[in-house]
Amino acid sequence: MMHDELEYRIQKLEKSNAKLRFLLLTCTMFLSGALILGIAEADRLLRIDQVEAVSITSKDISIIDSKGKRRIFLGMTKDESIASVQVFGADSIKPVIAFSASRDGKNSSIALNDSKGKEKMLIRLDNDSTSYMTQYTANGNVGNALIVKKDKPYIYGRTISLTDTSNKIRASFLLDESLVFQPQLSFYDAKNSLRTRLFHSDKSISGLAFFDANLKNRGLFGMSQQSSPLVVLNDSTGKPMLILPENKK
């Protein structure tokens, strides 16, 4: 009887162990599946294509293309004094467009650069008072600029043209160091023909010249390089009729 009871208890214990092993196996499979699904879901969340939110808080955000190259950056300088938005082209270091603003809001700018990062155009406000719109040449010098300082406008440039409603140039102000007559103020008729020119030269005559409809110079009132007065009147062919003072042989 003792032997039969012991055998019965051993069989019962083996059945219990079998149920326990099955339960453990089931739990292990469940947990493994949950872990795999969790990893897959985490990967999906990290690679999500669209985010909808009322607000996103971050010190900087970079937007990259499919090749992993940064194309847009939103952030601040290390001291948090300037916030900026930068758009990149050929690389992720030199922006082609940059928007910036100081922490106090008194200074802001928009810069347009070429593919090498050289500044080509700048629109800037300094200290809530002076505004600039500047264009730069290939060597980095100022080409043209419009500046308003203390409510007074200033224009910097080498060529300024005034056009009528038909887009024809009626007046121009030109400065070119390579020309004999460096600064020139010219006036044109409705057909865009030169009629009057005021000019200055460091190497030749300076003065006021008049032209007819055939672009023939008909009169010159000026001063020689030696600061002597000069008057020249020409006929319709451009041949001098009167020169004052007369040349003395």
Image: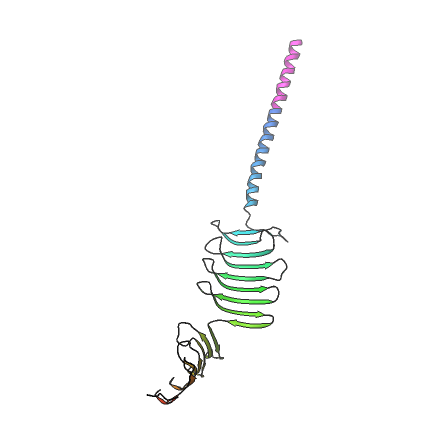
Where does the image place residue 43, in percent across and percent down from the top left?
55, 42
Quarter of the figure that contains the C terminus: bottom left
Which residue does the image show at 52% across and 61% down from the upper left? Answer: 111
Relative to the observer, which residue lies in front, 222 or 86? 222
* Residue 1 seen in the current view: no
Relative to the observer, which residue lies in front, 89 or 124? 124
Which of the 4 image quadrants contains residue 107? Answer: bottom right
Position of 37 with respect to 247 (left or right) is: right
Colouring scheme applied when the structure was drawn: rainbow
Where does the image place residue 105, in percent across and percent down from the top left?
62, 61
Q: Is residue 28 above or below residue 249?
A: above
Quarter of the figure that contains the N terminus: top right
Majority SS type along the magenta span: helix
Q: Is residue 95 above or below residue 41?
A: below
Which residue is farthest left? 249
Which residue does the image show at 64% across and 18% down from the upper left? Answer: 13
Specify start and end residues of the magenta stretch as a single range: 1-19
* Residue 35 seen in the current view: yes
Which of the 4 image quadrants contains residue 125? Answer: bottom right
Residue 74 lies in the magenta-colored region: no
Where does the image place residue 153, in percent across and percent down from the top left?
56, 72
What is the total number of numbered labels drawn onto the structure image?
Answer: 0
Where does the image place residue 78, in percent across and percent down from the top left?
58, 51
Which residue does the image show at 52% across and 54% down from the upper left? Answer: 72
